[in-house]
Image: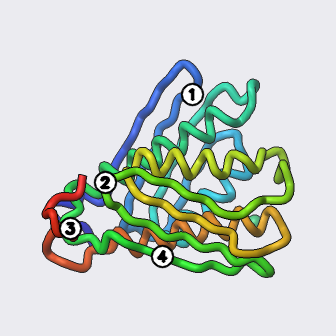
Amino acid sequence: MPNVNVPGTATIHRVTGETNVELSLSLYGTGQADLDFSVPFLRHMLHLFAVHGRFDLTVRANGDVDVDDHHLVEDIGLALGRAFHQALGDKHGIRRYGERHTPMDETLARAVVDFSGRPAFVMLGDIPDKRIGTFPTELTREFFKSVANEARMALHLAILYGENSHHMVEGLFKAAGAAIAMAVEIVGDRVPSSKGVLE
Ligand SMILES: [Mn+2]
């Protein structure tokens, strides 16, 4: 449950010349996702991200997908990252670190996070197929990088092994949701930093 310094919820409305994204997030939810935008594979991924993180997540977005999916995927990632940052307030009492290995059939994915206030992103592993359905797999990296930057967290993702591209990306999204859920859990009564502040 949230505390007085950690609101636990955020609503973001981000408009640019390329996209319009309305997103609301509840960190301590039940895994309800209400997703309305025209990138079906990302809808599938955000649904299971919400379920495995027990987040309530609503996204209504549109953009220049006639160009390609890049801007919309990136901007949904930016809005989601910003929502995590806002919902965490001053991070009073959060665990701060989270990690999860997630098997998806023959694939093993790993996510490790730190809500340190310093953005960092590393992703290891190659996805063999260039597309999953109509989704360009390179946008997996762009999406998570956007989330990490705006959430001001260190996010380390790895596909340790696997064969099927859909399983690999799905494993990453499930692992990321669960690792973030672990990190945002309220477990203490102070800001978890020797410096006393986590921006
Ligand atoms: Mn699937």
Q: Is residue 90 visible to us here? A: yes
* Residue assigned mark 2: 117
Distance between the Cα atoms at labels 1 and 2? 26 Å
Mark 3 and mark 4 residues within 8 Å of each other at the beta carbon? no
* Residue assigned mark 4: 99
**Which image quarter: residue 1?**
bottom left
Q: What residue type is labelled 2?
A: Gly
Residue 109 sits above or below residue 88 on the image: below
Quadrant location of ligand 1?
A: bottom right
Sequence-wise, which precedes: disc 3 or disc 1?
1
* Residue assigned mark 1: 19
Distance between the Cα atoms at labels 3 and 2? 11 Å
Q: In this view, does 128 lie to the left or right of 78?
A: right
Q: Is residue 93 left or right of residue 164?
A: left
Residue 31 sits above or below residue 118 on the image: below
SS for dot 1: strand
* Residue assigned mark 3: 193
How packed is label 1: few (under 14 Cα within 10 Å), some, or many (20 or more)?
some
Mark 2 and mark 4 residues within 8 Å of each other at the beta carbon? no
Sequence-wise, which precedes: disc 1 or disc 4?
1
Q: Nearer the viewer, residue 108 or 46?
A: 108
Between disc 1 and disc 2, the foreground one is 2
Q: What residue type is labelled 4?
A: Glu
Sequence-wise, which precedes: disc 1 or disc 2?
1
Q: How far across and how far down the image is residue 71, in percent?
A: 62, 32
Residue 138 sits above or below residue 18 on the image: below
SS for dot 2: loop
